[in-house]
Amino acid sequence: MSTTPSSSLFPALRREVRETPESGIVEVVNYGRTKPGLIGLWVGEGDEPTPAIIYEAATRSLAAGETYYTYQRGIPDLRQAIATWQSKHFGRAFSPDHIYVTGGGMQAIQIAIAATLGAGDECLMPTPTWPNAAAAMGVAGARTIPVPMSFGNRGWSLDLEKLFAAVTPKTRAIFVNSPGNPTGWTATHDELRAILAFARKHGLWIISDEIYARFYWRGDGERAPSFFDVMDPEDRIIFVNTFSKNWSMTGWRLGWITVNPSLGQVFENLVQFSTSGVPVFNQRAGVAAMEQGEDYAKHVISRAREGRKIVCDALAATGRVRITPPDGAFYAFFAIEGKADTRKLGIEIVDGANVGLAPGDAFGLGGAGYMRLCFLRSPGQLTEAVDRLTTWLRR
Amino acid sequence: MSTTPSSSLFPALRREVRETPESGIVEVVNYGRTKPGLIGLWVGEGDEPTPAIIYEAATRSLAAGETYYTYQRGIPDLRQAIATWQSKHFGRAFSPDHIYVTGGGMQAIQIAIAATLGAGDECLMPTPTWPNAAAAMGVAGARTIPVPMSFGNRGWSLDLEKLFAAVTPKTRAIFVNSPGNPTGWTATHDELRAILAFARKHGLWIISDEIYARFYWRGDGERAPSFFDVMDPEDRIIFVNTFSKNWSMTGWRLGWITVNPSLGQVFENLVQFSTSGVPVFNQRAGVAAMEQGEDYAKHVISRAREGRKIVCDALAATGRVRITPPDGAFYAFFAIEGKADTRKLGIEIVDGANVGLAPGDAFGLGGAGYMRLCFLRSPGQLTEAVDRLTTWLRR
């Protein structure tokens, strides 16, 4: 047996991979996960399992023996169902040729990165934001240029001049997550137009993550403003999406890319050479979600709407929290007076309130000093959680 | 609307991605797939669906609501089941800390590449071989150096001196697929030791694809020689594996990596930032395969053994085919007298024999001039297929 210390292998890995960050919330989750009675609101998922109307489509497919290799682009039924659903909700005609099924929103992002960003390339990214996209860019050898948003009386906002000033000759893409996780920042149509005009001028790609589009709380629109509303077909935009949020399917790892059909073969290849497709039976559940899941999606969205009110009202009433009800998504991202070290604060809240929140440090530049709370939960659970938090804050 | 031609988007993609190859068998598959009565033996999968004893574990998990996010490394039950199975079959003690669940063997390879090969790096690869690993390296910006094997009276062999001579200062890894697809080449223990010694000397990683280990026809061993038999724990070897072949689970996209536990956090990160894990319910089927699937795996293996005999005997008897029964895997990879252009030949065989074979050109340097036939099929189907082929050959 070798006598080399076990750490000898690590330095032999690629530098970019040695530098991949661990999840910034893992420390507090590991600290608190086994605490009896803890209410964990640190992760971006609801508390309901996938409904039977959706998962039974997978069960039937399994029993029918649909367990073979399949289309790399996704089964035709699912691509059609997504195209139809997206046409309905985004007021634009989509065909299956626009749609490429992926193993979750994360794989959709990874593939969008592979298509556009290589070693030494740069991507502009408003922060704070979900950290995985930047980390995946790091694995690809690309560099993320964070552009911090700011938090004011009207919530989180992005200074477009600051975004545009960050461009360099190495910039290849802008990653836009609107409505945004964790901030809830939601671009207006004017902002989307301005970003698109800038991207056109500099020949940049836009990777548009609109997975929270239907969790939209501003005005009475059915969904948030989308690049689909303002783009031309030939614009360099890759849309990433997921079944996770609308239909309580986080664990299914099922998502899709929408892109100009002329790039279809490239995206097929990128699926082929990464995961070689998504199980047919899981895709059947996706068809059920798209075709029969609208009532359930509305239920999920209205639960988030109610959760937002419960959490934001109660925390604001304490007078010790800087919070503005977010325009979109299902997170409260707020600061607590006198608590700047939010990594420590996460542990303190586990101990003091038996509630699990994610420290804002996990979400990149501009996130430190804030805590993220996922309010896609039952009203009862949220009421209990904010009771505990407000009691703890007031003592 | 823009007036730019649709092709304007393609040149804006990353060069490495514009250059990804399409599957080399797609041409003949597209040509033949709808032909009535065609027997397609071009793909590497059997003709049985996943058995109930395995898929019903997924069904139960779905009904139990296991539809949430889960462990990036794989659920503890599955990592334990794989460790136990692998300890039994590879005569070495594995713990769950060695095991990382992936979305198929392909994702296992992609992650192994991400860990070791970046832009400008080189990987040695004996060919002909399954093309996806090289293509994934291309997406990562790395370069594959093909080292063609040769075909003689005793079958396919690898000239180790030729392999070693291909090393350059940019070489970071050797990809070894033994038993090999499509050739059936299976390294001896001496060959594995020599490759390992060379890798140690040059500080190279070995990515070892032993997914066909139990499809082994030489001597009476239960499985092919493995790097597990000759390595030290600190050797730079990443093993990739899949549930696809042993248990008729090609469509499940379920595989695993075996690696030194000291690298666990890195591999967890690489899963997190690519697909964010594998559905729990699919992993439950993996547990069932590992714990209750041995009889079924033996059935699959014995079917392949029988198929090998049917195909190799019948084709050899024509006197027009250069074929040697392969030492491992479940493919016949053979040349037909006077037929050098195997892309054309694939079409010709569809038209003339109503059988679908994969042209050897698809498998890289050294593959042209050969055809691949998958013999993991029912004896009846194979008998019919070789009858058609021999009739066509003799006319």
Image (spheres, coloured by chain):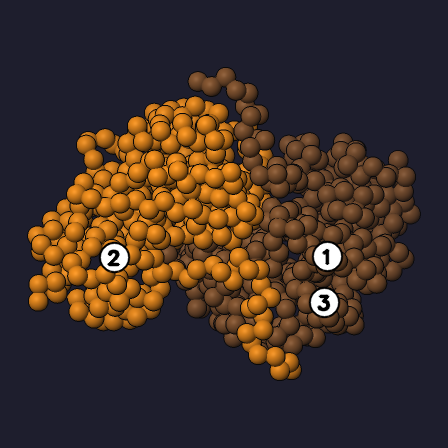
Chain colours: A orange, B brown
Count residues near mark 2 (Cα–Cα under 10 Å), then give few for <14, some for 14-19, many for 20+.
Answer: many
Chain for numbered disc 2? A
Q: Is residue B374 left or right of residue B82?
A: right
Q: Which residue is mark 1?
A: B124
Looking at the rendered structure, whether the residues under marks 2 and 3 are on a common chain is answered as no
Q: Quadrant of the N terminus of chain A?
A: bottom right
Closer-to-camera residue (B22/A66): B22
Which amino acid, by three-letter code, is at mark 2? Gly
Q: Which residue is mark 3?
A: B202
Local secondary structure at mark 2: loop
Chain for numbered disc 1? B
Q: CA distance from mark 2 to mark 1?
A: 49 Å
Q: Are marks 3 and 1 in contact (CB under 8 Å)?
A: no
Q: Which residue is mark 2?
A: A369
Residue A253 in the image: x percent, y percent? 43, 50
> Which quarter of the figure has residue A258?
top left
Chain for numbered disc 3? B
